[in-house]
Amino acid sequence: MSRRLGVLIAIVALASGALLVSAILRCQIGTAVAIQNVPNGLWLGVLFWIILTIAGSSLAVRMPGGTFVDVGFAPIVAAMSLGGPIVAGLAALIGATQARELRRQVPWYGTLANHASITGPAVLSAYALSMVPRSNPSNVWIDFLATVAAACLFFSLNTLTTAAFVSIRDGESMSKLVRADAGAYLNMLALAPVAWLMAQMYLSAGWWAVLLFAVPLYTTRLAYQRFVEVREMFTETVKSLAEAVDKRDTFTSGHSQRVQKIAMDIGRVMKVSDDDLEALEWGGLLHDIGKIGVPDSVLLKQDRLTREERTLMNAHPVLGAEIITPVRRLAPELPLIRHHHEWFNGSGYPDRLVADEIPKLARILHVADAFEAMTAARPYRMTPLTPEQALAELRKYGGIQFDPDVVDAFIRTKWGRELPDPGRPEGREVPLIGEAAGSLAIAGQAPSAAASAIPPAAASADSASTADPSRQRQATA
């Protein structure tokens, strides 16, 4: 835990504790929370909502971004409506306990941060709700809208506090983290009317009637779980497909998954959006899917490729894009798959795009693909480059094959952070030959012809660093 994170957790924990103590000293528990016609009904009512919150929190679902979502939000809002700041604070403080905390899967400061980020916002939102006159039965709409507004305030404060913790811990921007939680935010706010109905049923029918809401709450939790399961199933299917392609050549087994990890790390350093990060995740796995249509006689050939064989090999990005096109869910990945062999100077393939004409994510994938290939053995180069040598090649060909800004970002990932950095070459600009080639492609030159017209200087379509001019062989198998 960093010092900044520790200080922030301490501040939030002290503020939340002060708010709860202040509520206990200055406020009274709302009588509406009491269970009627039983001894100690007030405290039994408080205990009822705490237990209900614990039950909701125990059904936490880990979302793809790493955050946890549960339905304990609804009972806290209902308790807030019935019992005021004290009950809301106690339900949040105690009820937010999760099984993973009891199993000590969360460090003590993480548990403190989780409970503080819920308790403080719950008490503040309950204070705000208590300022609205809601005692008149005819003001049912005022009561409803005030409860929903308090729920919005509660979840907004909780989201911002959690985003601040994660921002310091992971170095992500708060705005990006808040945007990433937008879907969960809307889903949680949909529970606000449910929370209000829970409170109304508690008042009119009794505590037992609230138990009927276990079905919609569990259904909500199930929807989260199903979403995660479907996404995981889709991802695993994509991984299996990518691995099947990689295993056509024993030397490239696992290549796509390693490229995916490097590309996503570069994307995080460059602070791409969550949607772009997902595109890198799946695009990294599927970037070589087009090689499924390349004959083994070409794909596995160890000798020099003929002009016709090179044309077949260079067609794999186009073929990959054609394979993926019918899958609408993978539409954002199409530019990565088609353009991950474009060169920054325009001498790549299939469309001879130049510099910023190449999609940003494809430029990221190109660097990741080349680094992984250079540091792995291949039949045509049994001795791989060291990471230091591979980085030197990325720098050497920055502005020719690779986007220099992407190489700069690569240096700041775990893959390049500890390596000696030779720095950018001085005074390099995009060559005019690339611009001319790009113009020819735009004018209507066929992709296959463009792919086969790579000049001798661009010996390798993937990594100039590993090229052997006599072999003309792909570096990123």
Image (spheres, rainbow, N blue to C red):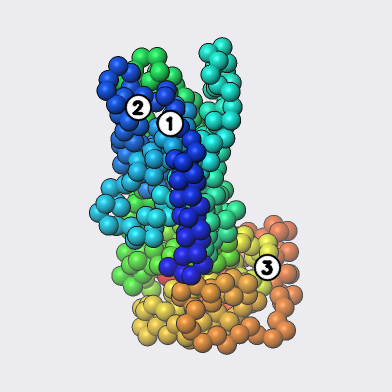
The 10 Å Cα crowd at callout 1, few under 14, some 14 to 19, many 20 or more, is some
Q: Which residue is mark 3?
A: 355
- Count all numbered tags in the image, as a single digit: 3
The 10 Å Cα crowd at callout 3, few under 14, some 14 to 19, many 20 or more, is many
Disc ID at residue 382 = none
Q: Which residue is mark 2?
A: 42
Q: Is residue 184 visible?
A: no
How far apart marks 1 and 2 lie (CA) works out to: 8 Å
The numbered mark, 3 or 2, whose residue comes first in the sequence reads: 2
Residue 42: quadrant of the picture: top left
Quarter of the image where the C terminus is located: bottom left
Which amino acid, by three-letter code, is at mark 1? Ile
Left or right of 155 on screen, residue 225 = left
C-beta proximity under 8 Å, tags 1 and 2: yes
Query: What secondary structure is marked by label 1?
Result: loop
In percent of the image, x 39 and y 77: which residue is there? 376
Disc ID at residue 29 = 1
